[in-house]
Image (tube, rainbow, N blue to C red):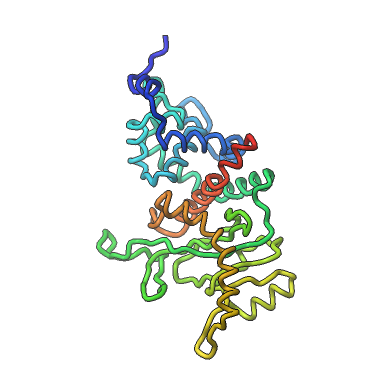
Amino acid sequence: MNRVSFASLAYDNKKKKTRREKFLQEMDKVIPWKDLLQIIERYYPKAGNGRQPMPLERMLRIYFMQQWYGLSDPAMEDALYDIESMRRFAGVDIVSDVVPDETTILHFRHLLEKHELTKRIFEKMQGYLTEKGLLLREGTIVDATIINAPSSTKNRDNTRDKEMKQTKKGNQWYFGMKAHVGTDSNTGLAHSIVVTDAGVHDSQVMDELLHGEEQAVYGDRAYTSERKRKEYEAKGIKWCVNRKACRHYQLTPEDVEYNHQQSQVRAKGEHAFLVVKHLWHYTKVRYKGLFKNAAQVFALFALANLYLMRRELLSIGA
């Protein structure tokens, strides 16, 4: 006779489905688990005569929940003990299964980082959405966002993170890194990501954010460049970057109207940033150095793309 926990019985008999349950059930249906597991499988420990590894899919599901809820490794372990909906999403039965401890969760994250698997997951998601007709690649919106890092030197090393830099935006100084993202002008889905320190100007990585098939490129004033405009137009790419005033030139009413029209398209590029920074609260780096943080950025935007398209994917039976 199978043993059932009191928490599981109470969960089955409750009357209301919470927002967390609805969210996890939706994401469970739209994530292409089989394709993602194939990416990681060759690097994951195989069962032998010693300690048996946790099921791969369980660990990937736990990793994704860490991204959605901003949980550290110890906090994720605690959440699995505390929250039944999270246990069910991870496929953990509190009575019959071993709950992964924080060290196991840490080792899985290190595995993804070491082999740059989150970047491959991001690329796989792109292919998946393209196959479904949701990533059109007609135009690209380029943009960047600052992710703050601790600026205090009151720590064990008495120094800031050496891989992070500071930059000035408006009248405010920021210290940390930048996530440069190229998004689809039709859907707002991210298709290219470059992570740098915050001191790198947005325009320096513009070329790396284009996939090469776009018919137009959109960007704010930070990307304004006459040289780039001529270069892109020579390739047949429409230049839709906002115009910028300078000391010897003020924007005309026509320029203002032009910028307004382009900004209406660029607004779609904010959707993925909105999900990552405001829904999943990723506004501060969680690790030291660019490498580990870049791995997390790829995972966050891959999941943000699926979240933005979840209703479309559910409607077509993904």
| Position of residue 29 measured from the top left corner of the image (x, y, whole percent) | 55, 34
* Residue 272 against residue 306 in the figure, above or below: below
Residue 85: name its quadrant.
top left
Residue under the image location 38 percent in, 20 percent down: 13
Quadrant of the rendering where the C terminus is positioned: top right
- Report if residue 42 is visible in the image: no
In the image, 111 versus 165, the foreground residue is 165
| Position of residue 153 measured from the top left corner of the image (x, y, whole percent) | 28, 65
Residue under the image location 37 percent in, 76 percent down: 171
In the image, 258 versus 52, the foreground residue is 258
Q: Residue furthest bottom?
A: 248
Callout count:
0
* Residue 259 against residue 318 in the figure, above or below: below
| Position of residue 306 measured from the top left corner of the image (x, y, whole percent) | 56, 45
Question: In the drawing, does residue 147 fall left or right of residue 135?
Answer: left
Quadrant of the rendering where the N terminus is positioned: top left
In the image, 32 versus 112, the foreground residue is 32
| Position of residue 93 measured from the top left corner of the image (x, y, whole percent) | 41, 24
Residue under the image location 37 percent in, 19 percent down: 9
* Residue 137 against residue 109 in the figure, above or below: below
